[in-house]
Amino acid sequence: MKKYITILISGLLLVTAGCDGDFADINTNPNSAGSNVFDPNLILPTVSYNYGNMMTGYTGAILFQSMWVQVMASTSTGGANYYSNADKYVASGSTNSYIQSVWNDGFSAASRVNQMQALAEEKGFTNLAAVGEIWKVLTLSFVSDVYGDIPYSEALMAEEGITQPKYDTQSEAYMMMLSDLETALSSISESADPIRNDVLYGGDLSKWKKLGYSIMLRMAMRLVDVDPSTAQSYVQKAVAGGVFASPADEAVLVSDQNNGYANSSANALNVTDDVYEVRWSDKLINFLKSSDDPRLSVVAEVPPAGLAANKDGSVVGNNDPAVQIGLPNGYDLKGGDKDISNAPNFPGGTGSGDNLAPIGAYSRPTAIYRDRDAPVFILTYAEVQLLLADAAVRGYGVPGSASAYYAAGVEGALMSIGKFGGESVSSSAASAFAAANPLDTSSEESSLKMINEQIWATTGVFANFVESWNNWKRSGYPELTPVNYSGNFSGGQIPTRQLYPASESTTNPEGLSNAISNMGGDNWTTKVWWDQ
């Protein structure tokens, strides 16, 4: 049963309530009781949703990273000109708002976790405090990967009087986060407090530990170029602790639109202009078609002919793999040299007259991406196995071969696509596909290329666009050709970070100034520490 709740924290919180009801049953008066009777487990659903909301939708992921890393594409004119931020790196009227969303949402989410932990510690709930630490590290590492240096050691300490926390360098923050994660995981005990009201794992502590160690693995693999010895050390710790062992372990967060917890990406993709404008890129479609990937018919469709059908998200398109065509990045509908009609192999529009859809023959996401109850894929078994394959290629001492990890990752990716709730790939088809497309082991570089292209495609079709972008920054794969559209804000290069929010110049000017100096600038193409 879905059990999302709204928790409004302002000094004293909610009264204890049963955790088996729906929203209406367990949402109670926030002013009716103090912390002595409040169960901090009640905060866990909101904490979980906050992270999922931060990594999806208009917080930036669809409007920035989905197209920066060429998973999606858009002609971004007409009503949906806000996609110029992504497809062409050209500012729209809301770009400054999008810039700050992950920062504001991330620190707000981490603050909520911190409040949950404080209440848990008052009650001796050591497991809930540890789960909170896993979630806080997950949240703030996400923020750091988007911006670079962030407050960490002094963050979330306003009650202690620190309202202008110092920015830790990303290298310092990462080391602290990895250490904090390790400490939290070692403190989890089956004999301590049970985790209740858990919408992610139903209170299963063994799965929380697997999530924590899988997060550790992903963070460690960020460091392969900048600090390979630390990367290897934490990869080995993660494997020894126990990462995801099957798709049943992965962190896939349910959504609940009826109670106000809709999938934010689906919210965006239900906007009429977005239904029409947002298409899969030719880079992704060509990748899936090159191997007859069975996910193609699950994720892509060509709408029926005409502008009206193209703007109608309730109309089912043609998902035959043979007709799928990806939209090339960097084109518009303005009639000039960048007009989509001038793109190589332009297939022509569909419909005619006032019902002409110039981009109608290009593939759009299927209805599973417009389902507001669609889950949010936070971290999957497939991604973990592919990262282990990468680690094995680098000789990091993980058990098993890169080929075996790669096959498990590919098979897991195909199996988990069914969790969206639409079509699925059978286990036999997934196994056959993995067997027919083994890892290229002819050279280390060939293996790394194949592994990381698969991470890009897999996280992309799971709508985890920021992770697609982060892993591209880390690995350099797939090889992407930047769009150099007139008036772009990144010098014709794919952005490698988001700018710090303008508000930081007044709320924490010294910290911001130090961070900008340390990072060598506050630009779209400034690189975060681990991006070498």
Image: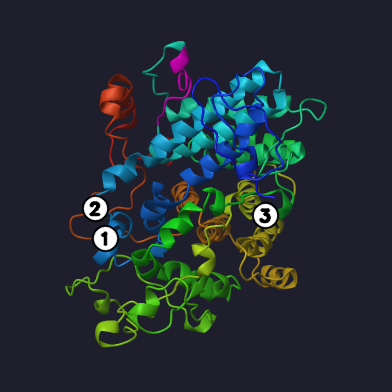
Residue 314 in picture, x, y percent from top left: 47, 73
| Eye-nearest disc, 3 or 1 | 1
Residue 502 in picture, x, y percent from top left: 27, 33
Residue at numbered disc 3: 402
Type of the residue with mark 1: Asn
Q: Secondary structure at mark 3?
A: helix
Q: Give how far apart the Cα atoms at labels 2 and 1 are.
A: 7 Å
Q: Earlier in the sequence, mark 2 or mark 1?
A: 1
Relative to residue 253, is residue 487 drawn left or right?
Answer: left
Residue 497 in picture, x, y percent from top left: 36, 43
Q: Earlier in the sequence, mark 2 or mark 3?
A: 2
Type of the residue with mark 3: Ala
Residue 268 in picture, x, y percent from top left: 41, 57
Q: Secondary structure at mark 2?
A: loop
Q: Earlier in the sequence, mark 3 or mark 1?
A: 1
Magenta-drawn segment: 149-159
Q: Residues within 10 Å of mark 1 (few under 14, many from 20)?
A: some
Along the line of sight, the residue nearer the viewer: 178 or 269? 269
